[in-house]
Structures are given as C-alpha cells and as structure tokens.
Image (tube, helix red, strand yellow):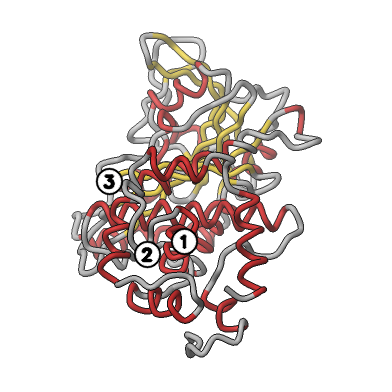
C-alpha cells in the first residue's frame, strides 16, 4: 500500500472498536484463515473499496491487486461480502455507541433535540421499496445517534427509537401514531410531530368529547398562531398534549392545495375531501412539551428544523450512493447498506476529530499514483 492509503487506514483503524478483528471471527465473516482474504484487515479494506469507493467487484479486486493488498477474484469478494453483513452491522453499531446519546454542552433548557425519519432503498430493477433505513440525528450537532435497517414492512414509528428522559423527538406525520407518541412519553421524552388529523383522534382537554380541529383552525388569520390543549388515548390511559397551528399565506395555501390535487390525480385515489383541502391552508403539529417550556410559535419554528434530517438523507444518497443497491440478493444487499452506514459514521467521527477522511476511497487510491485510471 502507498503511504497515503497507509495513513488513511491508520485513521480508520483508530476509529474501529478495539475488538473489531475478533468480531470478524465471531460473526463468521472469516471462518477459515486461508486464501487471499484470510485476515480481517485485508477483507475490510477490500469491502470499503467496493462499498465506499464506488468500485464494482471486478474494479475492487483489480485495484487491490495493483496496490498490493491482495490477489482475489470478484466471486471470492462477493462471497465474503455476503457473509460480512453481521460483522459490518456490529462495527457500525459499536462505532457510534461510543458517542451515542452524547449531550451537547448547552442544550436548550437541558433538553436534547433529535430529528427522526426513515428513507427507502431499492434493489436494481425494483418497482417499489425493498429496504428502509431508520435514522435519528441530534439537531445541535447533527450526529447520528440511532439507525436500523428493516425490510419494506418496517414501518415508521417512534416505538423503534430508543428514548432517554428529556429527549424531544421531531418527526413528520408518518410518525404520528398514538402508540408511538405514548412510547416516547412513557420513557420521559416529548414529541413535536406533524399532526395526522384523520389518523390521530383527539379529545378535549376537560371533557370526553372529541376535539374538532378544523373549527379551531378557522379562527386564525394569516400568520397567526393557535395553541389548544388536547388529550389522546393510548396504552390504556389518557395522555395530555397540545395542538399548535399557524395559518399559511394565501399563496402558500393555494400551492399546497394544488399539490394535494396533483398527488391525488397521479395516484388515482379519487376526489380530495373538502375538509382535507381546507386543512391544507394550515400547518398544525402535536406538541407534548409544556407550554411554559415551549411556546407555540417556538414549537412551530422548532419543527422546521426537522428538515436537517432530510439533508442527512440527501448526503447519504448523493455522496455515499445509498439510494439504489447494486446488489440483487438479500444478504449482499443488507451488507451493502450496513457498510454504507458504517462508512458514514466513520467519516463523521473523523471529521469531528479534525482528521482527514478515513476511507480508503477510489479518489485517494488514484492520488497515490496507482496505474489504475481514476473513476469519474
């Protein structure tokens, strides 16, 4: 290996768990010490060339052969990739566990703000979702503090996310389910979530009557903010919450209605209900934080910060190529996703520690005067 790749490997190795080599045997990524990929160091470097460097299997083994890493076939590397999913998953889990749930030095009011969401990953030729990556980041430092990989049936829910007392979890309406919100409250956390009015029945704060949201929204003028106490039933008990809302400008409301109508036409779901169209004139969220700790306008402003997790997904898909799988079998697909998440966490750790990129990437290999032609 060249001096540049040696340096990058040392950086990456310093970020790995102390027992990362032993884990290769424990997870059966390496079962017999024979062949060109007999040791964990060589295997992980080749896997990162393939998963993180954007190289095909044949390009990866060719690059490894030129750099003196190993002489292996693309078939051998594919077999090792398929058997390495557990190893890569465990490496990724342990790498961010060392800094998991690290609280910022000065969190607002002693609370930790987290954004939660999920994104989809498709295999080649797929017509729908094959896998779903569930992700959570701290808003003050944008560190990933939780991720999980499921198949397409792994729905978005707060119940999947570990919660600590004092956490405030921000999410879109896909997470607006009573059991999920109750899970967060039972753990001592709170939520700021886009309210799914038709899927989240609410009760009045002082009676057993249903809370009809639309008449309350109609009292707002453009730009005005509303804040109403409510309750909901879940897990065999009643929970308190608030609905915070703001009326959109006329232009924004019209754009939202056009988007709803266009979506219904594209999906051929039938006519849009009048109440749904009227609701598009407002932004309304469910908040469980006490009003004395978080005013309605501050809660609405805070919800806008949830967009940061969308930027995290954009980086994962555009820079780390997570969006589409170059694999066709379940074991190799899961290994690819786990390796990409592992690489993302190692890059973030290296950046925060002030060191260069820890991944022996294709570009770094090209800079090392390798005779291989750089990839565009």
Q: Which mark is residue 354?
A: none
Find residue 331 and report its horizontal and vertical position in percent. Answer: 26, 52
Q: Nearer the viewer, mark 1 or mark 3?
A: 1
Name the residue that disc number 2 marks. Answer: 36
The local crowd at label 3, few if under 14, some if 14 to 19, many if 20 or more residues have their Cα within 10 Å, is: some
- Report which quarter residue 183 is drawn in: top left
Q: Earlier in the sequence, mark 2 or mark 3?
A: 2
* Side (left or right) of 7 relative to 26: right
Sequence-earlier tag: 2 or 1: 2
Q: Secondary structure at mark 1?
A: helix
Q: Marks 2 and 3, how far apart in space?
A: 33 Å
Residue drawn at x 48%, y 50% is 281
Q: Report how far apart the C-alphas of labels 1 and 3 lie in the structure.
A: 30 Å
Residue 255 in sight here: no
- Provide the secondary structure element on which disc 3 rests: strand
Tag 1 residue: 42
Q: Along the line of sight, which residue is nearer the eye, 165 or 192? A: 165
Q: Nearer the viewer, mark 2 or mark 1?
A: 2
Image coordinates of residue 137 in percent, x first then y, are 58, 44
- For image coordinates 48% across by 15% down, the residue present is 239
Say which residue appears at 63% left-offset and 67% top-offset.
6
- Tell which circle, 1 or 3, labels the residue nearer the N-terminal end: 1
Label 2 with label 1: CB-CB less than 8 Å:
yes
Residue under pointer 3 = 151
């Amino acid at each position: 290996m060249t001096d540049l790749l040696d340096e990058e490997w040392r950086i990456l190795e310093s970020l790995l768990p102390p027992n990362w080599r032993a884990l290769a045997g424990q997870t059966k990524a390496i079962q017999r010490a024979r062949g060109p990929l007999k040791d964990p160091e060589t295997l992980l470097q080749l896997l990162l060339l393939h998963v993180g460097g954007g190289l095909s299997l044949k390009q990866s083994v060719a690059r490894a052969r030129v750099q003196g890493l190993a002489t292996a076939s693309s078939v051998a590397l594919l077999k090792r990739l398929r058997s390495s999913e557990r190893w890569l998953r465990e490496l990724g889990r342990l790498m961010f566990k060392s800094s998991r749930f690290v609280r910022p030095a000065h969190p607002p009011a002693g609370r930790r703000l987290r954004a939660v969401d999920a994104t989809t990953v498709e295999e080649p030729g797929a017509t729908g979702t094959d896998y779903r990556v569930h992700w959570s980041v701290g808003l003050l430092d944008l560190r990933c503090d939780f991720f999980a990989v499921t198949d397409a049936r792994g729905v978005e829910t707060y119940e999947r996310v570990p919660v600590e007392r004092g956490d405030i979890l921000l999410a879109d309406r896909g997470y607006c389910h009573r059991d999920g919100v109750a899970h967060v409250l039972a753990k001592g956390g709170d939520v700021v979530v886009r309210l799914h009015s038709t899927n989240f029945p609410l009760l009045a704060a002082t009676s057993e009557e249903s809370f009809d949201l639309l008449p309350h929204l109609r009292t707002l003028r453009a730009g005005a903010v509303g804040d109403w106490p409510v309750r909901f039933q879940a897990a065999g008990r009643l929970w308190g919450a608030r609905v915070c809302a703001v009326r959109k400008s006329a232009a924004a409301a019209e754009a939202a209605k056009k988007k709803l109508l266009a979506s219904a036409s594209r999906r051929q779901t039938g006519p849009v209900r009048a109440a749904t169209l009227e609701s598009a004139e407002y932004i309304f969220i469910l908040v469980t934080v006490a009003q004395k700790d978080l005013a309605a306008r501050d809660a609405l402003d805070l919800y806008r910060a949830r967009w940061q997790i969308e930027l995290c997904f954009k980086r994962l898909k555009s820079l780390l190529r997570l969006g589409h799988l170059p694999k066709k079998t379940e074991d190799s697909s899961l290994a690819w996703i786990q390796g990409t998440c592992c690489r993302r966490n190692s890059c973030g750790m290296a950046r925060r520690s002030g060191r260069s990129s820890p991944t022996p990437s294709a570009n770094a290999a090209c800079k090392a005067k390798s005779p291989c032609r750089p990839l565009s």
